[in-house]
Amino acid sequence: MPASKLQQDETRQRRTVLLRLRRQGVRFDDERILALGYASPNAARKDVTRALKAHYDEEATEVTVYRQQENERLDALLEAAWPRATTPTPVFNRDGEQVGEELDMRAVDTVLRLMDRRAKLNGLDAPVRTELSGPDGGAVPLGTGALAELDQLIAITGDTPTADPAGDAGDHSD
């Protein structure tokens, strides 16, 4: 049986206090949290998880609604630009004679930008792969990460270390 409105309100109030205490760094086994009516620190921990999941679900719903609205706006703009981008228009010379037909390239560019925006909005583009390479396209030389090695890597890239406030640029032989 679902919780009554009174029980739901009490749960919301208890979670609000619980989350406030947790943001302050109060541990789950602290008496202030147990005084909220939790049977154990583990019960309080589970309630935080439930509260965060409920918030996440609400947020996901809002994102879905927003994405739908943006898609509808893009549809309207695309509908307006599509005919000019896909239907050739006549081209006339100075004498008024038709010499050919061409697409409106500004409209084509607009359509492509709208399509790109839709792909980004809906996550349709494949992730961009990047690759790091070392000198002459080889492997990136890595070691234990000692300061001398890091200075050497900086030297390979051509960037020189900037002077630190003490005034010794790159000298790490302390």
Image: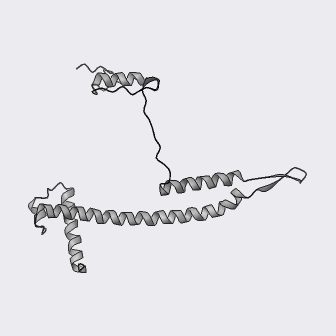
| Quarter of the rendering occupied by the C terminus | top left
Q: Residue sitting at 23 percent across and 61 percent down?
A: 49
| Quarter of the rendering occupied by the N terminus | bottom left
Q: Residue sitting at 29 percent across and 19 percent down?
A: 171
Count of numbered badges drawn on the protein:
0
Q: Position of residue 135 (x, y in %)?
A: 44, 23
In the depicted structure, whether residue 138 falls above or below residue 114? above
Question: In the rendered view, does 9 fall on the left or right side of 90?
Answer: left
Question: In the rendered view, does 124 fall on the left or right side of 14?
Answer: right
Residue situated in front as seen by the camera: 82 or 8: 82
**In the image, farthest residue toward the left:** 31
Residue 65 quadrant: bottom left
Report whether residue 119 is seen. Answer: yes
Question: In the rendered view, does 54 fall on the left or right side of 88?
Answer: left
Residue 44 quadrant: bottom left
Q: Position of residue 93 (x, y in %)?
A: 87, 50
Q: Residue sitting at 63 percent across and 64 percent down?
A: 79
